[in-house]
């Protein structure tokens, strides 16, 4: 007889685990074997190290992030500075006139304030400006009269001096042939004759430059009149146009900038006058001609720190060599060294140390950079500009108070 079949178990038993549940149980078992599950890690504050996926951001070194942050800010500041100087370069006559007006104001403002105690303010400003103009024109006319009066004697002395230089070059240790010197003289004459038209055009261009200089001086005097008369009210009006949050900082920066600029102007004038007096006395004692023009050249050259005074004394050395011979020229060269030491170690620390606190390396870099950017005017303006910027930075840093982190 056929054996009765037993009923097979039904796989659809509701008590049996489903396929998805079995997968979850296996995954939980694997996580338990690895240690601790992800929810437990989050609850206990333990962060699991996971392999970086395609969406994870790469880690950047903190130092590199800091350098990058400073780099783009420096680039922005450099672009702004370049734009400002480009605009000033397009209008350099106006910028020069304003700068000269500020210089005149720094020099004559104390005189006008002193006169205004006894006279009306407009009259005091007029007397200060007219008196200074008369003084400058008197000095220039005296220099012109000195040169005109010594013209005949200078021509003779320079001719004799050139002959002495030729004889000196023919003797040991140079031993140059007279033919060589004659060839050099003939080449110089041929160059001047062949480039006469270029020299004439340069002279005509110089006349155009002279007109520009006169225009700049007139505009500078016009600006200085108002700066001396009511510069403080003009600055107050400018600050009132700014937002209230920026007025205090701008006022602090303006006071620091003007204090440094006036201190630098007074100090450099005193240093230049001292150098001019020393050079004039030394050249007069040595019997070198053109004492007054050379002393005046030294005065104006001293406005270019570090390099102006040696250049002026080099011109004096050439004059001494042509008029008095190599011995006096050697003494003038020694004078360059002595006056440079006096200026660098005595005058600048005593007279300008309180107004301009810059390292000599910074001064040298500023002068060279200004000369490359804008010629002689840039060399003159570079040091006071850097000094003003540094003083403004220091003033704003002190104004922040104890909240500013100490270095």
Image (cartoon, rainbow, N blue to C red):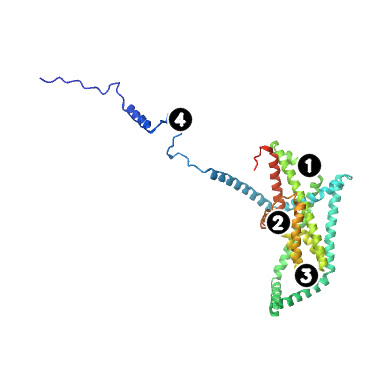
Q: Which residue is mark 3?
A: 328
Label 3 – label 4 distance at C-alpha: 91 Å
Q: Nearer the viewer, mark 1 or mark 4?
A: 4
Most foreground residue, 87 or 79: 79
Foreground: 95 or 404? 404
- The residue positioned 44% from the left and 35% from the top of the image is 48
Residue under circle 2?
Answer: 379
Total numbered labels: 4
How packed mark 4 is, by other alpha carbons closer than 10 Å (few <14, some 14-19, many 20 or more), is few
User: Which residue is label 1 attached to?
Assistant: 233
Q: Quadrant of residue 37?
A: top left
**Does any portion of residue 206 appear in the rendered image?**
no
Assign a secondary structure to mark 2: helix
Q: Are marks 3 and 4 in contact (CB under 8 Å)?
A: no
Q: CA distance from mark 1 to mark 4?
A: 67 Å
- Cα gap from disc 4 to disc 2, whole angstroms: 66 Å
Query: Where's residue 261, x and y in %?
Result: 75, 49
In front here: 4 or 50?
50
């Amino acid at each position: 007889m056929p054996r009765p079949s037993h009923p097979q178990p039904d796989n659809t038993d509701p008590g049996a685990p489903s396929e998805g549940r079995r997968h979850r149980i296996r995954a939980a078992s694997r996580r338990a074997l690895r240690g601790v599950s992800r929810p437990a890690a989050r609850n206990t504050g333990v962060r699991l190290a996971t392999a970086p996926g395609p969406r994870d951001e790469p880690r950047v070194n903190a130092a590199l992030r800091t350098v990058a942050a400073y780099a783009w800010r420096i680039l922005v500041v450099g672009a702004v500075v370049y734009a400002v100087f480009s605009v000033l370069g397009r209008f350099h006559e106006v910028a020069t006139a304003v700068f000269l007006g500020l210089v005149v104001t720094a020099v004559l403002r104390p005189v006008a304030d002193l006169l205004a105690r006894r006279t009306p303010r407009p009259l005091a400003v007029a007397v200060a400006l007219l008196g200074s103009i008369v003084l400058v024109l008197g000095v220039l006319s005296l220099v012109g009269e000195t040169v005109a009066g010594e013209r005949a004697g200078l021509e003779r002395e320079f001719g004799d001096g050139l002959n002495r230089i030729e004889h000196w070059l023919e003797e040991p240790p140079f031993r140059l042939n007279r033919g060589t010197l004659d060839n050099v003289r003939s080449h110089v004459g041929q160059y001047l004759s062949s480039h006469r038209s270029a020299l004439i055009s340069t002279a005509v261009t110089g006349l155009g430059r002279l007109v520009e200089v006169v225009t700049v001086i007139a505009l500078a005097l016009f600006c200085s009149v108002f700066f001396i008369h009511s510069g403080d009210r003009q600055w107050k009006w400018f600050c009132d146009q700014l937002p209230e949050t920026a007025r205090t900082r701008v006022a602090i920066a303006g006071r620091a900038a003007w204090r440094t600029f006036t201190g630098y102007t007074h100090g450099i004038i005193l240093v230049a006058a001292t150098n001019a007096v020393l050079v004039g006395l030394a050249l007069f004692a040595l019997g070198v001609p053109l004492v007054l023009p050379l002393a005046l050249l030294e005065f104006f050259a001293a406005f270019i720190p570090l390099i102006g005074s040696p250049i002026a004394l080099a011109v004096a050395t050439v004059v001494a060599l042509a008029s008095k011979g190599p011995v006096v020229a050697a003494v003038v060269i020694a004078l360059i060294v002595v006056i440079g030491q006096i200026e660098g170690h005595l005058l600048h620390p005593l007279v300008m140390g309180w107004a301009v606190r810059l390292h000599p390396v910074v001064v040298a870099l500023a002068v060279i950079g200004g000369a490359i950017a804008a010629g002689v005017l840039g060399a003159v303006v570079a040091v006071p500009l850097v000094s003003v910027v540094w003083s403004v930075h220091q003033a704003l840093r002190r104004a922040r108070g104890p909240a500013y982190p100490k270095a």
